[in-house]
Image: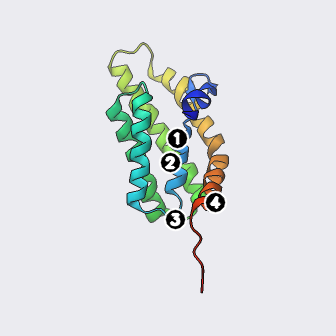
Amino acid sequence: MFQIGVISQIKLQAGKLDLILLVIIALVLINKIDLQDSLLIGLTASFIIGLVSAEPFVFVIFFYLSATMFVYYIRSRVWKIPLITMFFSVAVVTILHHLIFGLFLIFEGANFGFSELLQSVLMPSLMLNIFAVIPVYFLVLEVWQWFSPIEEEE
């Protein structure tokens, strides 16, 4: 609800900050979380956002689950540096989300063009998300360390 009530008021032209996406990506990048837990996090977040979002419910669930699986794949197979992986993942997922949903709206008869989609929605959203990557990543990591059990060495 913080995303809807407070964060949605942070706008740059028509672009908005997607805090839920950033938190999901940061949680998936924690090495102690396996694939099943990552998918559960993505499904829960997508279900909640799908209920309150103006986007089609199926699109929201597909988007967040796809983002979760993409980030998990990148984390486990490609890069081992979480902060760089988060920057890359946020950029790719934000671009794909806005392009796919924007093209869907254009084909449905929305009254704006592709260049307006790029200039007014995609680039400002990408900029806001990229600016928020570092604070969100370190905040999620710190909260995770507070609440996760500490393994003792013998």
Dot 2 or dot 3: first in sequence order is 2
Label whose residue precedes the other's in the sequence (2 or 4): 2
Residue that label 2 marks:
24
In the rendered image, the vertical position of residue 76 relative to residue 92, given as above or below: below
- Residue on which the image places disc 3: 31
When asked about the image quadrant of residue 130, the answer is top right
Q: Secondary structure at mark 3?
A: loop
Q: CA distance from mark 4 to mark 1?
A: 20 Å
- Figure check: 95 above or below 119: below
Identify the residue position indicated by label 1 in the image: 20
**Mark 3 / mark 4, whichever is N-terminal:** 3
Scheme of image coloration? rainbow
Which of the pair 39/80 is nearer the observer? 39
The numbered dot on residue 146 is: 4
Q: Residue at x 66, y 53 (%)?
A: 138
Q: Secondary structure at mark 1?
A: helix
